[in-house]
Amino acid sequence: MNEQNPERGQMSLDDLLKANKAQFDKVFSSQMSEAGLQSADHRPATAADLETTSITASADVRDVTANLNARFGGGWSSEVLEHKSERGGVTVLVKLTVDGVSKMQFGSARANGDTGKALQRATDDALAKCAAMLADETSVAAEAKTAPQPPSPDAPPTARPAASGDKLDTVTLDLIENSLRNARHEMDAVLFRSAMSPVIREQHDGYPMITDPRGRMIVGKFGSYVPAMLKAQKFDLQPGDVILQNDPYKCGGAVSHINDWIILVPVFFDGNVVGFTSMFGHMTDVGGPVPRSMPTAATSIFGEGLRIPPIKLYERGVLNQAALDLIMNNTRTPEVNYSNLMAILAGCRVGEKRVVELCSRFGADIYSHACEALLERTEKAMRQLIVQNLPTEPQSFEDYVDDDGCGNGPFKMKLTVWREGEHAYFDWTGTAAQAPGPINFYLHDGMFKMFIGVYMIMVFDPQILFNDGFYDLIHVTLPKGTLVQPEFPAPLGCRTHTLSRQFDVLGGVLSHNAPNMATAAGYGSSPHFFYSGTDKDSQNFQFMEMLYGGIPGRPIGDGMDGHSWWPLFESIPTEYLETYYPMVIEGYNSVIDSGGAGLHRGGNGIEKIYHLLAEGDVSIHDDRHESQPWGILGGKPGAVSAKWLVRQDGEKTPLPSKIDNVHVRPGDRVVFRTAGGGGWGDPLEREPGKVRKDVARRLLSAGSARQDYGVVLHGDDFVVDLRATLELREGTKRNRRPPPMFDFGVRGANGTV
């Protein structure tokens, strides 16, 4: 639905329903019950109140308009911000603006069978209360005067900022918060509907944010890299400027490999920067020696593709065409990259527009106060989480990345954690030196703080607005020259294997002191499949897909099967793949028994079979071929990943976890199997009925049910033999060693034992 609601300005009805319904219900329910459907303003009644209240004596809108015109002249405007009908009544929130000064009040009326007239009476009631508030202000001008605003696409007229002493009430804060949440999702929607590459459009590898003037993220999904960008490059920012860059070494790790292109847009209101909107998305190809620009054999970032330092792609609204032409001349997919880049910019423009609207609606000062309040609220919540769950004595944990794609490895990742009061410390000292190959992750400390925040907030209180408010509470040590802080010009193209393994390490180290945070290891990698060549119509194609594996068992339940470790990623529909690329998906299944056994089992990995229809080359990025995803608190480790090339004649060849340019012919198949997740808790404590259900769903074999869970099943219907199950479990417990805290499997933590 795209119809516009005139009472909401440019916000559609869908936007209103999605963004504000739940919050509106909560706020209005409490407001109506506590105030008896009265105004949110609790001042003692004044003579002006009594005088202006007479406006509502008549249900005729002409009387209300006449009274307002008589009092304020023609320089007033009103807007119904919210409305709700229930229990025979109507409640509205109305904003009245006179000479740039705005006031908001609730109004109410009984429906008496006619909701439309009740809505008008409730609006009149609210307008009267707003008028009473404005009567106490300094005399207002007969005509509204608005300050000039720097150019911004489709921006509404500016309003005079609210005075700094104005109170930020909870209703206003909730409205601004939900408007920003909605704006962030609107940025996503524009990107995903406009970009051409499936990794952005279908898998959602794009990251929006809205920040304050210091670059601190207010809403978003990946934490703010803006402070690092602003620190690395000083710009004289003007309205209409757009910054583009992709070089990790030129922005302090704000972006971590050159396939991710960042757009940064300063948001101006009344001549001042009130924040930034920004997005980055993954470009399939940015030049370099191999299609898709993520060579597994790279030993320098110079061998990975085009590096773009921070530049003004637009300056004062004028496109830098020469720079754009140079960039597009260095990619194998200029049309796709151009589409993706413009989609990212369009998403940023939408965010910019929404921020300007909020400043116009509430005033820049109120908007600024709201941003600070949202940051402070997140900081307060994180203080409690730190004190409750982090140890005062240092605790360490280590895990390993198998190899770097160049024959080197394994590579240790070690993290030590402790707290001092309400401040948390995360120290990566002891992590392996940077790799010769491209698994290095140039980690900005702000990005790692974001990972910590995502982990802790998602575990304890997912309703907390995720933003940068807690960053000052987190202190990160990243030793230079290591896997997590490589020195230029170390290659970075395959850094996601190290990135995703961080979550395993983080879960392991936090489990020492907080069992309720203790998760097993997940598939701990970032599986990628690439296929390029020429199709039957002599058209070049490049395909890239991220695959997913087993999520670890957790205190709250089983891990998910074949799911992304980053919760917002999605899979590419098979129909899309088979329509746009020369391939058929012959299988897409859960790998039976690949999830680690446990009271809460690890999720299974997946097996995807690509039947290739055109000659070309395939490449693979993955890890966990050697080291198993470990189990915890008695849980068993998950299965490792594996890959095979099956030629048309049936010859089957194992493939390594990282390899480039394997030549394929029509009829060849690639079998891509991802790792499972580790189990949580003693599998002998799992309910037999759940084990039976897993067997019936082909997630678990009957043999594993007996061997790993001690559950005896009979017949094709997998009937549980309770007596035999009890006897088997008791015997197993008597004869086994006590379960370890961590079970790394027969190969050990580094996959070599």
Image (cartoon, rainbow, N blue to C red):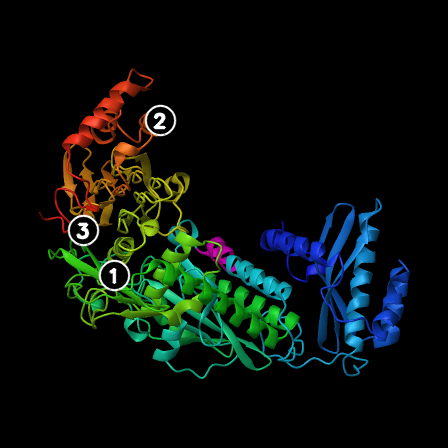
* Mark 1 or 3, nearer chain start: 1
Dot 3 falls on a residue whose secondary structure is strand
Q: How far from the left and from the top, in percent, is residue 142?
A: 82, 80
- Residue displayed at 13% across by 55% down: 410
Amino acid, disc 3: Ile
Q: How far from the left and from the top, in percent, is residue 180?
A: 55, 63
Residue ID for mark 2: 689
Out of 686 and 87, give the one closest to the viewer.
Answer: 686
Amino acid, disc 2: Gly
Amino acid, disc 1: Gly
Q: Farthest left residue?
A: 753
What range of the chain is rendered magenta? 187-195
Quadrant housing residue 561:
top left
Relative horizontal placement of residue 547, taking residue 365 as reference (left or right): left
What kind of secondary structure does the magenta stretch mostly adopt?
A: helix
Q: Which mark is residue 708?
A: none
